[in-house]
Image: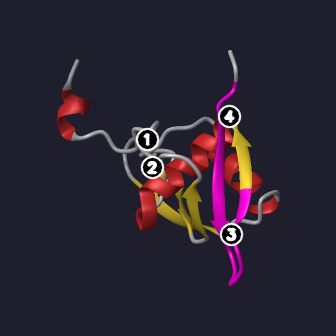
Amino acid sequence: MARVKKSFRVFDGEGLPRSIELVGRDAWALGALIHAGPVGCTPITTPGPRWSGYVHKLRHRYGLNIVTIDEEHGGPYAGTHARYVLKTRVEFAEDPEEDRPDIRPDAEQRAAP
């Protein structure tokens, strides 16, 4: 199976945007961050196997400003989790609705068997 490739425009200065092309889960993670907007993503609301790894790569390899907010959660395995918020302006180079990730299913979708 071929890995998904996505192109993005990064606006990190006064000049022209720069283009980056991501593949696989890195492309998926950046797409999820863009769609989530200022609310951001958590591994709870947007499950993914290695959010910290995707964010590390997006920060260090592609120079994106992504803030980590530590949040507490309750339940039988109470603890903390990270919320990641994209601060750099990034846009899809193609149609963003084409494969919008299912970030927060509504209550009806969650309740469906």
User: Which is more toward the observer, 30 or 80?
Assistant: 30
User: Which is more toward the observer, 3 or 9?
Assistant: 9
Please tell me whether residue 85 is drawn above or below residue 76 in the rendered image. Answer: below
Q: Is residue 97 left or right of residue 79?
A: left
C-alpha distance separating marks 3 and 1 = 22 Å
Give the mark nearest the N terminus, 3 or 2.
Answer: 3
Q: Is residue 106 left or right of residue 77?
A: left
Say which quarter of the image contains residue 69. bottom right
Residue 106: x, y in percent? 24, 41
The residue beneath circle 4 is: 24
Mark 4 closeness class: few <14, some 14–19, many ≥20 residues within 10 Å:
few
Q: Which mark is residue 100?
A: 1
Give the mark nearest the N terminus, 4 or 3.
Answer: 3
C-alpha distance separating marks 3 and 2 = 42 Å
Asked whether 95 falls inside the magenta stretch, the response is no
The residue beneath circle 3 is: 17
Give the mark nearest the N terminus, 2 or 1.
Answer: 2
